[in-house]
Image (tube, rainbow, N blue to C red):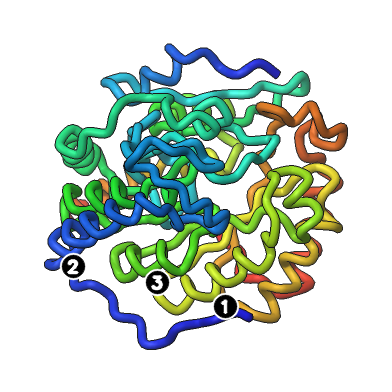
């Protein structure tokens, strides 16, 4: 069953830092029985146990810089990438960092806040927290939010595989959810990312996000997966989130373990791209660049 | 495909910024973690690439919004 809570209660901008700081303490305590992502490992990360993501109690940062490669309306953005992820996508373009939560440097919120201020001077309009998957480091994320300049719009870049608990910590803090909808069926999700019940979990997150913040749904087109993945995603979005902004990305490149899947060994073809756009237009989706 | 070397990735949390590029045999360029400087460079190499132009202009457009030209 898909639950959609109503009556969103956005945190006032002036309160964002204090609310995030307060929540960070509570969120850190829940690492003793980690239920942040839909794998529900239940491991005690505070005691050194590791679940599927292998993340410990402390977050690490593998990239923090001003970027202009994301959706135009979010640019320029100060992108903060945390190491570690709860999915195992074969084609992950940051596989070395996403699959290894010990990659990068130890998180220092003071340093990040200073970098964010410099980025703002250089034009940053937003700060984007991403990974890997930032959900697995939610306590650290809340500490980052508490430290960032309050005037920055905040973007939550996620694989949409979090739990209701994770959403409760995030509610009202981010202006935009930029959420991936990667696979259009559970078989491809299991086969390419090792994740069960993908449709149920992602759809629940997307519906929740659409009620609690601005939402952009992003889909990375994969070679050989237009009919099995993109078409059903487009159909579901048209039926359930008809006004949501959709970002269709065609820049797939065969990274990390893509070679283990014959269809993923080449970039996305022009023919498939045209076919994907025909599908998008046939469902009258609200595409953004 | 081999994972990327660690020392390259570490650079992005210090003072240096980094973009990763994949250049195909037909000349198509894919960019990941696109920085403003790299967007400007790619735009200069291929000014007819509209998406890249929009990204290269992102910083400039934002600046002109903040400081409108005097009339």
Q: Along the polypeptide, which appears first: circle 1 or circle 2? A: 2
Tell me the subunit letter for badge 2: A
Q: Residue B13 vs residue B71: left or right?
A: right
Q: Residue A141 vs residue A228: left or right?
A: left
> What count of labels does the image hold?
3
Give the labeled residue for mark 2. A13
Q: Residue at x 66, y 48 (%)?
A: A220
Quarter of the image with the N terminus of chain A in it: bottom right
Numbered disc in front, either 3 or 1: 3
Residue A226 location, x and y as percent? 82, 54
Q: Residue at x 55, y 32 (%)?
A: A99
Give the labeled residue for mark 3. A213
Q: Which mark is residue A243?
A: 1
Residue A77 location, x and y as percent? 35, 45
Crowdedness near tag 3: few (<14), some (14–19) or many (≥20) residues, C-alpha within 10 Å: some
Near-viewer residue (A18 or A37): A37
Q: Residue at x 79, y 72 (%)?
A: A282
Residue at mark 2 shares a chain with residue at mark 3: yes
Q: Residue B70 vs residue A100: left or right?
A: left
Q: Residue at x 57, y 78 (%)?
A: A243
Q: Along the polypeptide, which appears first: circle 2 or circle 3? A: 2
Q: Along the polypeptide, which appears first: circle 3 or circle 1? A: 3
Residue at mark 1 shares a chain with residue at mark 2: yes
């Amino acid at each position: 069953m898909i639950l959609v809570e109503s009556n969103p209660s956005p945190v006032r901008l002036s309160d964002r830092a204090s609310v995030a700081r307060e929540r960070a303490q509570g969120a850190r305590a829940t690492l003793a029985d980690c239920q942040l992502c839909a794998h529900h490992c239940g491991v005690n990360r505070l005691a050194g146990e590791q679940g599927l993501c292998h993340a410990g109690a402390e977050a690490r940062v593998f990239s923090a810089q001003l970027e202009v490669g994301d959706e135009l309306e979010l640019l320029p953005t100060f992108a903060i990438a945390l190491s570690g992820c709860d999915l195992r996508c074969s084609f992950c373009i940051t596989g070395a960092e996403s699959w290894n939560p010990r990659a990068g440097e130890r998180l220092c919120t003071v340093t990040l806040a200073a970098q964010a201020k410099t980025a703002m001077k250089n034009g940053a309009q937003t700060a984007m927290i991403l990974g890997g998957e930032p959900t697995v480091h939610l306590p650290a994320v809340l500490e980052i939010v508490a430290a960032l300049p309050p005037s920055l719009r905040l973007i939550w870049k996620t694989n949409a595989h979090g739990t209701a608990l994770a959403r409760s910590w995030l509610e009202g803090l981010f202006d935009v959810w930029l959420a991936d909808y990667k696979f259009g069926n559970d078989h491809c999700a299991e086969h390419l990312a090792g994740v069960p019940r993908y449709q149920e979990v992602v759809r629940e997150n997307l519906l929740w996000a659409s009620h609690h913040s601005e939402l952009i749904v992003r889909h990375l087109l994969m070679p050989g997966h237009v009919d099995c993945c993109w078409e059903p995603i487009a159909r579901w979005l048209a039926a359930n989130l008809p006004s949501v902004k959709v970002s269709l990305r065609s820049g797939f490149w065969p990274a990390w373990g893509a070679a283990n899947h014959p269809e993923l060994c080449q970039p996305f073809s022009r023919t498939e791209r045209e076919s994907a756009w025909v599908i998008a237009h046939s469902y009258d989706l609200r595409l953004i660049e | 495909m081999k994972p990327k070397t660690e020392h390259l990735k570490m650079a992005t949390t210090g003072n240096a910024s980094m973009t990763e590029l994949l250049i195909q045999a037909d000349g198509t360029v894919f960019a990941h973690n696109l920085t403003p400087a790299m967007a400007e460079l790619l735009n200069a190499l291929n000014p007819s690439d509209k998406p890249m132009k929009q990204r290269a202009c992102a910083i400039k457009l934002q600046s002109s919004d903040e400081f409108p030209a005097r009339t």
